[in-house]
């Protein structure tokens, strides 16, 4: 399956998931929450000749956003998120003897299927563990960065701070021009986590996730700057490990429980109901 077919397949799958999710009658319960946390960003080059020309360093970023959980049943959940994510890369370009420390800004839209199981621990008490998997769709908003060394030393400067512009204009000094960028990025998210109950149908989640990018940022020599002969190879994708905390409000949508006895409600599943003592008739 080529890249175009892969994107079409994922787009159709995302549309189907969205159409299902807006029909809330399918779900007995939903959760609405907020999330935030740090992430460590690495770089994966798609070409072997590109890998040999770069020394890679990990870059620290973060993400913050909103989460919606659609509970299909007690074990299976559809998770949809909308996040702002700060990514990037920090690389040493051997051939140019130059360092490029770049920060990229993204809007991420992961769609994950979750399988959960309840556990009981003497120390932690009762909690839920889960496994996530699903596609991640991202849109590249822009970014900035710093170039150091190389031919900058020949023009009497040790570094150059730049902003990213998606254009082939190349007229302004201090701008990194990205030609033919892949602003829509596709990846796969894998992760695990634990959920702890709080009061009033609220939960706190600790989520561990690995994001494996499947789309290159651009083409060979796809990033250029004015006055410098420097051209950067954008045939790379991000590989990210993230830790986040999620605060969730859970809402029961199952109207079928209305009017039923307390013994049939979800809150009382597994609880022993008190015995009813029959009154004796007076003789």
Image: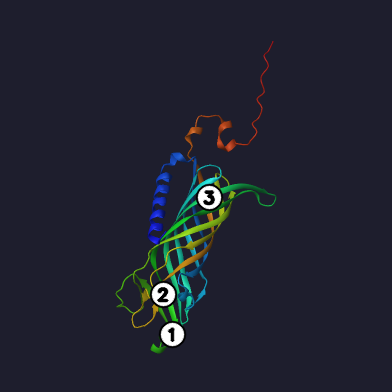
The residue labelled by disc 1 is 150
Q: What percent of the width, then of the height, locates residue 240?
A: 51, 64
Q: Nearer the viewer, residue 67 or 10?
A: 10
Callout 3: SS: strand
Q: Quadrant of residue 8?
A: bottom left
Q: Residue at x 44, y 39 (%)?
A: 25
Of the 4 image quadrants, the one containing the C terminus is top right
Task: Establish if 213 lies above or below 22.
Answer: below
The residue labelled by disc 3 is 114
Callout 2: SS: loop
- Distance in Å between CA atoms under marks 2 and 1: 16 Å
Of the 4 image quadrants, the one containing the N terminus is bottom left
Q: Residue at x 43, y 79 (%)?
A: 147
Of pointers 2 and 1, the one earlier in the residue sequence: 1
Task: Establish if 235 lies above or below 230.
Answer: above
- Distance in Å between CA atoms under marks 3 and 2: 36 Å
Residues tagged 2 and 1 counted as in contact (Cβ below 8 A): no
Residue 233 image label: 2
The type of colouring in the image is: rainbow
Callout 1: SS: helix
Between label 2 and label 1, give the one nearer the viewer. Answer: 2
Q: Pointer 2: residues within 10 angstroms few (<14), some, or many (20+)?
A: some
């Amino acid at each position: 399956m080529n890249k175009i077919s892969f994107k079409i397949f994922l787009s159709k799958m995302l549309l189907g998931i969205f159409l299902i999710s807006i029909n809330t009658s399918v779900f007995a319960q939903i959760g609405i929450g907020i999330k935030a946390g740090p992430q460590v960003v690495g770089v994966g080059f798609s070409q072997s000749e590109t890998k040999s020309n770069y020394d890679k360093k990990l870059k620290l970023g973060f993400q913050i956003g909103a989460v919606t959980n659609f509970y299909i049943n007690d074990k299976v959940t559809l998770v949809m998120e909308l996040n702002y994510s700060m990514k990037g890369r920090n690389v040493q370009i051997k051939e140019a003897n130059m360092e490029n420390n770049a920060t990229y800004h993204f809007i991420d839209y992961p769609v994950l299927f979750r399988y959960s199981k309840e556990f009981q621990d003497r120390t932690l008490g009762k909690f839920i563990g889960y496994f996530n998997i699903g596609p991640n769709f991202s849109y590249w908003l822009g970014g900035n960065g710093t170039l150091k060394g190389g031919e900058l030393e020949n023009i009497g400067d040790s570094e150059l701070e730049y902003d990213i512009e998606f254009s082939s204009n190349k007229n302004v000094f201090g701008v990194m021009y990205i030609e033919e960028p892949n602003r829509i990025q596709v990846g796969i998210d894998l992760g695990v986590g634990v959920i702890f109950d709080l009061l009033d149908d609220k939960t706190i989640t600790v989520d561990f996730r690995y994001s494996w990018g499947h789309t290159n940022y651009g083409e060979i020599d796809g990033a250029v700057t004015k006055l410098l002969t420097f051209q950067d190879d954008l045939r790379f994708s991000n590989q990210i490990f993230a830790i986040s905390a999620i605060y969730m409000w859970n809402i029961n949508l199952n109207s079928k429980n209305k009017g039923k006895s307390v013994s049939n409600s979800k809150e009382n599943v597994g609880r022993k109901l008190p015995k009813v003592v029959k009154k004796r008739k007076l003789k």
